Amino acid sequence: MKLPFWATLLTILGLCVLCVFGTWQLQRLAWKNDIISQLNQAYDSPQNAALKLEEITGNELIYGRVNGIFMPDKALLLGPRTSNKEIGNDLLVPLKIGKNTLIINMGWTPYPLDQQPIHHLKSRKVWFEGLIRKPKWNAFTPENLPEKDIWYKADIEEIAKTKSLKAPYPFILRAENASHKFDAAFPNNHRLLPNNNHLQYAFFWFAMAAALASVYTLRFLVKRPQ
């Protein structure tokens, strides 16, 4: 039986591509499972445990409490972000901890800086509890415009230079609780547990590969009765 050259070649290429996509999703599944495991471990730790910031690299996910001097005059909005189909930003406020500075992500807000309920606590000592995370962004994230106080990515070095922050830690605390209720909204970050649909995606790509192989087999390999 002579197999058709182009149909065979294109089928092989298609199977390779589909299997690569399926394998990539399985790799993403393992990666996401590891993150979820780290998050569960972090959230299972004592919620009011003081964080030893000097021992944190930022690559791990750790939950705990920090104390410091609130600096609302150095706050910024990071975004845009959407919440319930409404456009807003994340509110980031520095916290002075000894000779260092830690940036606190207090959560999503639809309001500009001058309308944030934070300025009455300037230079007050406060504590925050939350998850330590190293900021990340992708290649499609626009460049910041620090001269206009417009921030698309949480580039800590750039923020520290623009806001004159001393010795910033290379990570951000995503606050979920605080010593002060700034209003009904802050801090408004909820427990972080990302979606994990990669197994479904992997099944889809492998199913497509199986379907393609079945079509080729039925068309060119199965002998039809004469």
Image (spheres, helix red, strand yellow):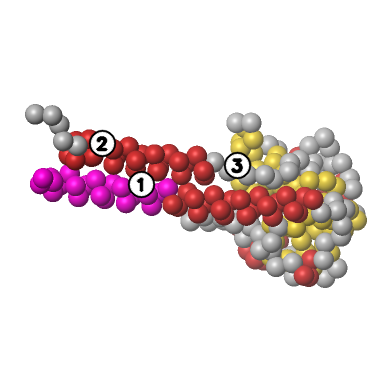
User: Which residue is at the far front?
Assistant: 225
Q: Identify residue for label 1.
A: 18
Q: Write down the region rendered in magenta.
A: 1-22
* Secondary structure predominantly adopted by residues drawn in magenta: helix
- Residue carrying label 2: 215
Element type at mark 2 = helix
Name which residue lies at 31% across and 47% down.
15
- Pointer 3: what residue? 195
SS state under label 1:
helix
Q: Looking at the image, can residue 220 be seen?
A: yes
Q: Amino acid at mark 2?
A: Val
Which of label 3 and label 1 is nearer to you? 1
For the residue labelled by badge 3, is the local secondary structure a helix, a strand or a loop?
Answer: loop
Magenta stretch holds residue 56: no
Q: Earlier in the sequence, mark 3 or mark 1?
A: 1
Quick one: quadrant of the N terminus?
Answer: top left
